[in-house]
Image (cartoon, rainbow, N blue to C red):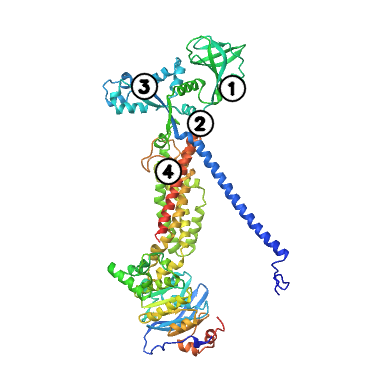
């Protein structure tokens, strides 16, 4: 009997059926692996898509645009008392010289409406840097100072190329303007191939003799238009056709402002730099001034309160329930309720916080203190469950070894079981804290959704939190806040990564001790 | 089994030996299960007593009654009396921690703490305040390691983790840990079941040496081991102490047929 396929065998491993079974088994395994790889690939794809999208959207929020111009520090404006004192300069009008200088750079804004539009290019706090510069060196009063002025958020968006594309083409022949300002006609033009001149169409402009004319109509080679920037003279001259691809009706900047900003860009006085303000300011109604620091500190204080409250309480509760508590109906009831609490919707905890901490105990509204208390309640069940699991996972032999050399129950747990359970407890804690960091609903109910400009300096100052800030900004109509929202998401994610990194570091430390 | 292959080198316990542990009418219940039924036994001082019997016969349960390790099991209930030196160890006034300092234990699976070798042994003396200062503590650690026959192997790496040792070394470390608190009794629950024959032989040698100073109670599945190291042997079956006597008698001339069947390998 040397043949392995002997019919005497109970299972013939060389029969066709057996071979088919083997092949089927291999195929099933290969299929399963393929599913796994596909699942991971799919998940990775979504993650990459999400991160790319957020980063792409957030990129504009990390730079800001300035006007770098020479401004005369006229004493009558910036030193109203005329004594050169700090108080006098601090109360000075710094907007006036900057606005005057801007009107020089961009002539033609003669009426009040145009002046107001021109001034709106500059942020409402845009001249603070100028003031600080003079305050640092009061000898500059009366001299011409090279300073940087912050642009408004809409102007900033144009500089970043987000308001409209500007397309410039050379025009055929020469045009003869009928005037240099107001509504004029341009004769000698070839027919323009444009869809129309309404505010829903891309804006059509003509550049001629150093000025800009917005075309409002064409008939038989004569273009009618409004002068946006005055022309030098009425002589026939070469011209360029400019198109603002986004129609005026669907952007916040008017054609005139775009013309100004385009001119400023060509004059080379606009520069971009990293937006430190985003990390040093609190919230603001003005997108270019709004920063994340208020929400970041709010989240930080909230997390501190949460951690300080729920880590010791949670671990102590877990140790008692797991190691010391008698097993009876009461502890069963407590256990069931802890498990149930972990599944309670977070907004319920917000209602609880509102009813108990704010209305009953009268703690200050909108503060990280109350936020931390509410989130601690939210996280506590998670930490207790994770810690109990970690304690239960410590091999009983360690406990017996300690008891065997005469350690008391408590000594065995605190000297031997708890240190071994610590990595698991930390993991549970960090999952809970990450959960708490991203939690928005309960914070809305305790008033951390308020518009708060000041950066909180402690847990009892009114504050908001990162996810709430994201929610607030995402709701605002200004286009610049869309980038801020994405940037805030990045900050929140980084916060999370740092927190998790810290936890992993601590866990390694604990593990290495053994 | 050919008993002539397992030589019994030692003589019987001298009749004047004092009784160290005396159990009378011990019953243990795990919930509804009656795990140990009316066990009465006298264990002599400075000798090795071996408990043999098939798995689940209650020998480990009885061993764990001697240092009240069963207290850690919620559903365990014990009745009857166990005296050590005439003192009832189940009186409410007795501190179980003090008891376990007097009655050390070595477990089936080596369970060194996941700390350094030094810390493993220093832990007991430290919590009991046995050493006055660091030098004394070091003396205790070195002394215990020497008595456990481990010192030469680990003297250069006392700061290494106890879990980095081999299985046999770990078990000797556990024995060193047990004797570091100077117990009077050492309980061993199948100390060699996870070890290879060479490591087991070392442990057996060690047990024979330790017998000079300690009362040792050992649970074992190996009849040869019981025959080699013990002076007295008790055979448990189904929660009942079937027979107890001098090891030579049990192995050569058992009174009970069940003992005879077990030691000759007919069941168990």
Going by the picture, which residue comes out furthest to the front?
A: A2
Q: Chain of mark 3?
A: A
Q: Quadrant of the N terminus of chain B?
A: bottom right
Helix or strand or loop: what does disc 1 sit on?
loop
- Please state which of the two labelled residues, at mark 4 or mark 1, is closer to the viewer: 1
Helix or strand or loop: what does disc 4 sit on?
helix
First in sequence, mark 4 or 2: give its number.
Answer: 4
First in sequence, mark 3 or 4: give its number.
Answer: 3
Query: Along the horizontal axis of the image, is B209 left or right of A153?
Result: left
Residue A14 locus on image (x, y percent): 70, 66
- Please state which of the two labelled residues, at mark 4 or mark 2, is closer to the viewer: 2
Query: Along the horizontal axis of the image, is B131 left or right of A393?
Result: left
Work out whether disc 1 and disc 3 sit on a shared chain.
Answer: yes
Residue that label 1 marks: A201
Helix or strand or loop: what does disc 2 sit on?
helix
Residue A396 locus on image (x, y percent): 46, 67
Residue that label 4 marks: A299
Residue A225, quarter of the rendered image: top right
Residue A365 locus on image (x, y percent): 41, 41
Residue that label 2 marks: A479
Work out whether disc 4 and disc 2 sit on a shared chain.
Answer: yes
Residue that label 3 marks: A71
Work out whether disc 1 and disc 2 sit on a shared chain.
Answer: yes
Q: Quadrant of the C terminus of chain B?
A: bottom right
Q: CA distance from mark 3 to mark 4?
A: 41 Å
Disc 2: CA contacts within 10 A as few (<14), some (14-19) or many (>=20)? some
First in sequence, mark 1 or 2: give its number.
Answer: 1
């Amino acid at each position: 009997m040397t043949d392995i396929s002997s019919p005497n065998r109970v299972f013939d491993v060389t029969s066709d059926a057996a071979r088919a079974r083997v092949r089927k088994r291999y195929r099933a395994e290969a299929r399963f692996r393929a599913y796994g790889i596909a699942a991971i690939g799919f998940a990775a794809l979504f993650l990459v898509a999400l991160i790319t999208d957020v980063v792409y959207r957030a990129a504009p929020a990390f730079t800001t645009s300035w006007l770098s111009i020479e401004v005369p520090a006229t004493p009558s404006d910036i030193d109203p008392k005329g004594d050169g004192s700090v108080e006098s300069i601090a109360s000075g009008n710094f907007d006036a010289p900057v606005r005057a200088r801007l009107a020089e750079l961009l002539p033609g804004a003669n009426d009040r409406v145009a002046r107001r539009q021109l001034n709106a290019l500059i942020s409402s706090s845009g001249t603070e840097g100028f003031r600080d510069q003079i305050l640092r060196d009061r000898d500059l009063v009366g001299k011409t100072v090279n300073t940087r002025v912050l642009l408004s958020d809409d102007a900033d968006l144009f500089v970043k190329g987000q308001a409209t594309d500007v397309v410039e083409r050379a025009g055929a022949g020469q045009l003869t303007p009928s005037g240099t300002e107001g509504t004029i006609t341009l004769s000698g033009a070839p027919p323009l191939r444009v869809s129309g001149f309404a505010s829903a169409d891309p804006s059509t402009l003509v550049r001629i003799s150093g000025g800009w004319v917005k075309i409002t109509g064409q008939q038989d080679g004569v273009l009618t238009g409004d002068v946006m920037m005055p022309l030098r003279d009425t002589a026939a001259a070469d011209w360029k056709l400019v198109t603002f691809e986004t129609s005026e009706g669907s952007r916040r900047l008017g054609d005139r402002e775009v013309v100004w900003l385009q001119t400023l860009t060509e004059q080379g006085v606009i520069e971009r730099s990293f937006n430190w303000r985003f990390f040093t300011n609190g919230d603001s109604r003005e997108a270019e001034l709004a920063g994340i620091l208020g929400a970041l500190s709010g989240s930080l204080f909230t997390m501190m309160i949460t951690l300080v409250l729920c880590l010791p309480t949670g671990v102590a509760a877990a140790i008692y329930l797991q190691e010391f508590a008698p097993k009876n109906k009461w502890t069963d009831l407590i256990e069931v309720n802890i498990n149930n609490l972990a599944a309670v919707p977070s907004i319920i905890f917000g209602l609880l916080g509102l009813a108990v901490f704010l209305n009953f105990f009268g703690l200050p509204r909108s503060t990280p203190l109350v936020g931390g208390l509410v989130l601690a309640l939210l996280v506590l069940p998670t930490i207790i469950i994770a810690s109990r699991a970690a304690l239960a996972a410590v091999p009983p032999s360690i406990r017996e070894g300690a008891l065997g050399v005469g350690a008391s129950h408590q000594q065995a747990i605190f000297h031997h079981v708890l240190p071994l359970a610590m990595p698991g407890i930390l993991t549970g804690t960090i999952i809970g804290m990450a959960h708490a960091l991203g939690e928005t609903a309960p914070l809305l109910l305790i008033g951390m959704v308020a518009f708060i400009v000041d950066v909180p300096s402690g847990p009892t100052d009114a504050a908001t939190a990162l996810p709430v800030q994201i929610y607030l900004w995402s709701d605002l109509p200004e286009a610049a806040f869309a980038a801020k929202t994405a940037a805030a998401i990045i900050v929140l994610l980084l916060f999370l990564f740092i927190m998790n990194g810290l936890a992993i570091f601590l866990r390694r430390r604990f593990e290495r001790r053994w | 089994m050919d008993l002539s292959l397992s030589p019994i080198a030692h003589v019987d316990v001298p009749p004047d030996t004092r009784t160290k542990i005396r159990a009378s009418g011990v019953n243990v219940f795990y919930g509804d299960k009656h795990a140990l039924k009316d066990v009465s036994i006298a264990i002599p001082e400075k000798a090795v007593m071996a408990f043999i019997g098939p798995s689940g016969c209650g020998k480990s349960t009885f061993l764990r009654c001697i240092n009240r390790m069963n207290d850690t099991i919620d559903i365990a209930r014990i009745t009857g009396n166990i005296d050590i030196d005439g003192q009832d160890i189940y009186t409410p006034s007795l501190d179980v921690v003090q008891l376990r300092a007097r009655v050390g234990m070595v477990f089936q699976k080596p369970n060194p703490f996941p700390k350094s070798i030094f810390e493993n042994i220093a832990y007991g003396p430290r919590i009991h305040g046995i050493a006055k200062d660091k030098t004394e503590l070091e003396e205790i650690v070195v002394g215990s390691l020497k008595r456990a026959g481990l010192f030469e192997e680990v003297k250069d790496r006392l700061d290494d983790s106890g879990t980095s040792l081999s299985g046999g070394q770990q078990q000797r470390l556990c024995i060193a840990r047990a004797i570091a608190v100077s117990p009077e009794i050492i309980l061993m629950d199948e100390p060699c079941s996870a070890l290879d024959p060479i490591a087991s032989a070392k442990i057996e040698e060690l047990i024979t040496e330790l017998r000079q100073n300690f009362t040792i109670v050992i649970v074992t599945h190996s009849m040869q081991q019981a025959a080699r190291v013990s002076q007295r042997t008790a055979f448990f079956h189904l929660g009942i102490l079937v027979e107890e006597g001098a090891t030579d008698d049990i192995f050569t001339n058992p009174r009970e047929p069940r003992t005879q069947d077990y030691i000759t390998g007919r069941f168990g």
